[in-house]
Image: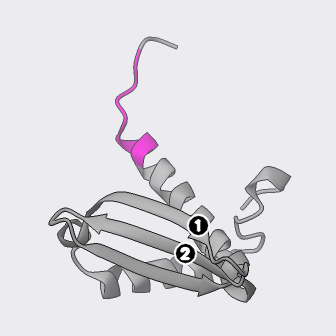
Amino acid sequence: MTDKPEAWWRPTTPEEAADLEQQQAGFKAQFGDFTSVLADGFWLGCSPDGQYLAFQFKGLDGSIHRHTLPWHIVDVFFTQFSVAVDEMGQRQFALKEPAGAA
């Protein structure tokens, strides 16, 4: 939880935080093995009419996977994306060995 405007994706109440934590835990359990679907390349763009946000991912085997989102749920995508990247950064930071002396 935060009152910093630059962290707009963070929950602002304990209830929102608990709901978000439950959603993320459910997603991770449903997703399964993260490394088995690893991508080593990606491209992003939008459709010529601006109605879809497009994603293209290249798998390790060279396969291409394409997906689109309609414009009216892109804001939800960016919120979820921001939450996931924030968690990723926090977890990476927690793994980092302290350097130097205080």
Could you say whether the residue bearing mark 1 is in a helix, strand or loop?
strand
Q: Is 51 left or right of 3, judged from the image as shown?
A: left
49 or 10: nearer the viewer: 49
Residue topped by disc 1: 45
Q: Are circles 1 and 2 on residues that touch, CB within 8 Å?
A: yes
The reply to whether residue 25 is visible in this rendering is: no
Find out whether residue 87 is within the magenta segment. no
**Image position, residue 65 (x, y; %):** 34, 77
Query: What is the three-letter code of the residue carrying label 2?
Result: Ala
Residue drawn 25% across the image and 80% down it: 32
Residue at the (37%, 68%) spot, across then down: 57
Crowding at mark 2 (Cα within 10 Å: few <14, some 14-19, many 20+): some
Q: Which residue is mark 2?
A: 54
Whole-percent x and y of residue 5?
Answer: 84, 54
Residue drawn at (21%, 75%) of the image: 33
Mark 1 or mark 2, which has the lower sequence index? Answer: 1
Q: Is residue 63 left or right of residue 69?
A: left
Task: Look at the picture and state if 38 lies above or below 49.
Answer: above
